[in-house]
Amino acid sequence: MPEKDAQTAPPPAGEPTVANLTAELATAKDRLLRSLAEQENIRAQGRRERDAGFAGDLLSSVDNLERALACVPEDQRAEPSVAGLLAGVEATRRTLLDAFAKHGLKRFDPIGEPFDPHRHAASFEAIDMRYPPGTVTSVIQPGYMYRDRLVRPALVGVSKAPDPPQEDVAAGLGGTPPSKTAAP
């Protein structure tokens, strides 16, 4: 019977119990799993940033191909040597854009959308009666998104409200308050 008493007797002072060791092991395992998950998240974020940076570096190539296509005058496009060159440049541009789309890089041309400073960079404002004020009316350079991340904002022109007529300004109906004169 002395063995039975040894099993039920409390451990000597200073020695951990099985319950304490189990709790400590569970805590250590939880910390380890959290640490591993955090490391994986950091690796994934690094890959996304690297991929977005690489894609962003290639955007100037697409821009240059589009400029090359746009600079050829219409009257010269039918010449055989120019037509062949244009076809090659267009095929290269299209292949590059297809590769972008395949890997999650998407182009956006926001004409007609409300101006969003998180996705658009305004280059100028102009009165355009086709659109309400604050709407993108022209795209100078398209924007690109890599999955859910902005790689390059679209460079745009934005519509603005027409200036009020001069008689409205003089009468105080425009944006400028009429001047106050002091009473004698």
Image (cartoon, helix red, strand yellow):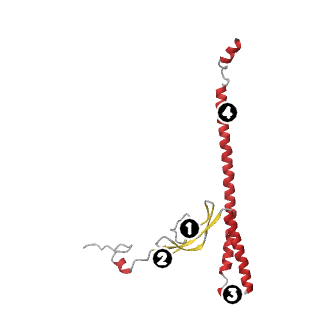
**Residue to which mark 2 is pinned:** 130
Q: Position of residue 74 (x, y in %)?
A: 65, 86
**Residue to which mark 3 is pinned:** 76
Q: Position of residue 44 (x, y in %)?
A: 68, 53
Could you say which disc has been placed on residue 120 in the image?
A: 1
At x 68% / y 49%, what residue is drawn?
40
Label 4 to label 3: alpha-carbon separation: 78 Å
Residue 74, compared with residue 157, is above or below; it is: below
* Quadrant in which the N terminus is drawn: top right
Q: Nearer the viewer, residue 147 or 179?
A: 147
Q: Which is more N-terminal, label 1 or label 2?
A: 1
Label 2 to label 1: alpha-carbon separation: 20 Å
Secondary structure state at the residue bearing disc 2? loop
At x 66% / y 76%, what residue is drawn?
66
Could you say which disc has been placed on residue 25 in the image?
A: 4
Q: Which is more N-terminal, label 3 or label 4?
A: 4
Q: In the image, 66: left or right of 124?
A: right
Q: Nearer the viewer, residue 126 or 73?
A: 73
- Crowding at dot 2, Cα within 10 Å, few <14 / some 14-19 / many 20+, comes out as few
At x 72% / y 73%, what residue is drawn?
92
At x 61% / y 71%, what residue is drawn?
142
Q: Which is more N-terminal, label 4 or label 2?
A: 4
From the viewer's perspective, is the residue at label 4 or at label 3 nearer? 3
